[in-house]
Image (spheres, rainbow, N blue to C red):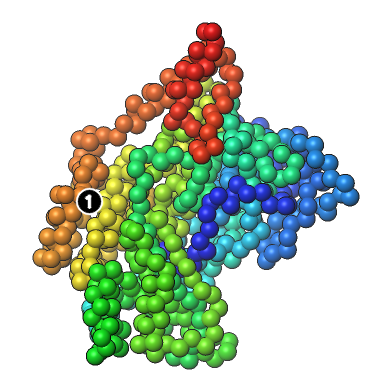
Amino acid sequence: MACIRMAVASATSLFIAPSHYAASLRLPSASRKDVQRATPSPDHRFRRRLDGIRRHSLSPTSSPLSALSATANEADASVDATPLSMDTDVLIVGAGPAGTAMGAVLAKRYGLRVVMIDPRIHERWPNNYGVWVAEWEAVERQLQLGVDECLDHRWEKTDLFLDPGGTTPLRIHRPYARVNRIKLQQRLRAHAQQAGVVMLDTAIDPSSVRHDDTGSSVRLQDGRSTELRTKLIVDCTGHESKLIERDGRHDPGFQIAYGIMCECERHPFDEGAMLFMDYRTDYITEAQKGEPTMQTDLDKAVREPTFLYVMPFGESASGLRRIFLEETSLVARPPMSFDECKERFKKRLAYLGVEPQKIEEEEFCYIPMGGAIPKRNQRVIAFGGAAGVVHAATGYMICRMMSGVAPTAEAIAKEIRQPIDGVFAPDRAARTAYAALWPAQFRRQREFTVFGGEFLMQQNVHNLRAFFRGFFNLELPMWAGFLAGWPGLPHNDQHETWTRRIAFSLSFFTKLNNAVRAALVKSAVFGGGVDLLRALTPDGVVPYDDEAIDREASANEALRSEQYGGQPLEVLGIDKPNGFDVLPTVLKEREKELRA
């Protein structure tokens, strides 16, 4: 639903060295102490190091985005492989929407020195996004980065088909839009570069990550083993991050979708509306009537539901109708196969009489939903997909992520610019950033959506139709607030407190049929557990252990500082390079060495 297009790729690519990288030309000064809008000025020591890196780098490969990045000079005839070093305030790993937006705000609004690395930094972002217009406008009000100019089509109406067949949709009068991913990338990257964010087309060596009392160091896989020193690392490598640890068992559901952007002679959809969900199964019952496979296919479609998602764009330059169509498995564990999704998609299009004449893009969407969020007592700060910001019951993420930029960036900037007692403490800074992104009140709201996702993946198509019919018959603020599910987005206030969530649950319950009511009660009683109890009771009834975690972390920091005089503690471990969950063991081992 949230992701129209996703090229499936593992975050491990951020740790594979390419043969080249490029950098932008300016970096803001670290001298300012106030956390206000700051005009960046050059840090000449950093620039000299950066110039040395650029002189010995290879030119980037040509790409549609080459013009957005300052390119490196041509390689010298004989490349000097002498290792270089550089330092910065914040290292961002990953240059997708999350990393680029975070880098732009940190540098532009707070004047921090930011380095962003990604071996695919010159490539176009593969993901397209569908958004509620009201949410996207709220994002622009928060960030002031001109993202409101990055929509390329808007529909004033949204339709749903929630019956086995028929031609009359449930119509919602709430505008929906498609984000132009190329414009969004250009706009965010331009802000980042203008603010002095350094963009390196390279990767990091995960085994080189080291944390100490003043920051972290990593080694770049750039052919020179350049060492980068940073106060904080922000992980924007996506859902499959290898840099962070999660808080508890991570067992997400998965949204899977297959679709195409195409041109066709005709289609049956209203071009003044986008089709949000089409749960009809008449493409099986009518098209395969009398065939021996009909009942088998129908049983499977009932047991493992999928829906059609459609964006009609009107007439193309060729005179054909341009349209995006996608078959989606909302959430399942294990995930539905792409082959199954594609087969249903073909059958549905054949029944609807849609014959693609030209296919512009083939779409594969893979979104982990729910699962555990990152631990708050680790040095690396996860953001975006790595931080679990995707909506656990819908798959939406882009507006939620963008709304999380401002509070997280502010927390990071305050810790760097205005540290307590005038001393920067990276462990405390990372915890502060996590607290800003995932405050306890909001985690309770997330628990509610995780329960929703777990419930939805257990339901057959009959119950899903009834569920969404009741859901979208609620007052708009109630259902829109649940879909937003993030502070700062429209109508989220309807779900921010346990009393509001109770009120939503009671109102929703009255809109459902008995079959769905029974399924909800069963799921709540036997599957809700402590997490659902947290979501639906006063804050102190089932508290999180944040204070205990912070006390333990503070004690570890004090022990490290007092006993070892600020000596770097190298927390090793290739699989989990941040390694803060094993810090007490490391401390004990170091203490034994000193006593000996």
For the point 52% across and 8% down, the residue is 595
State the quadrant of the N terminus: bottom left
Report which quarter residue 469 is drawn in: bottom left
* Residue at image mark 1: 501
Q: Position of residue 498 (x, y in %)?
A: 22, 45
* Residue at the limit of the structure toward the right, as seen here: 77
Q: Residues within 10 Å of mark 1 (few under 14, many from 20)?
A: many
**Residue 149 appears in which quarter of the rendering?**
bottom right
Mark 1 is on which residue type? Arg
What residue is at 56 percent from the left and 55 percent from the top? 96
Q: Quadrant of residue 35?
A: top right
Q: Is residue 230 visible?
A: no
Vertical comparison of 270 with 530: above or below: below
Residue lying furthest top in this view? 595
Instruction: Assign a secondary structure to mark 1.
Output: helix
Residue closer to the observer: 509 or 126: 126
- The answer to whether 460 appears left or right of 83 in the picture is left
Q: Position of residue 446 (x, y in %)?
A: 32, 48
**Residue closest to the eye, 517 or 437:** 517
Q: How many marks?
A: 1
Q: Is residue 409 left or right of residue 294?
A: right
Residue 247 seen by the camera: yes
Residue 578 position within the rendered picture, expressed as x and y whole percent measured from the top left: 51, 35
Which quarter of the rendered picture does the C terminus lie within?
top right
Q: Is residue 119 left or right of residue 310?
A: right
Q: Residue shown at 20%/71% (left/top)? A: 462
Q: Position of residue 428 (x, y in %)?
A: 47, 29
Q: Is 227 above or below relative to 330?
A: above
Q: Residue at x 37, y 83 (%)?
A: 347
Question: Is residue 283 rendered to the left or right of residue 149?
Answer: left
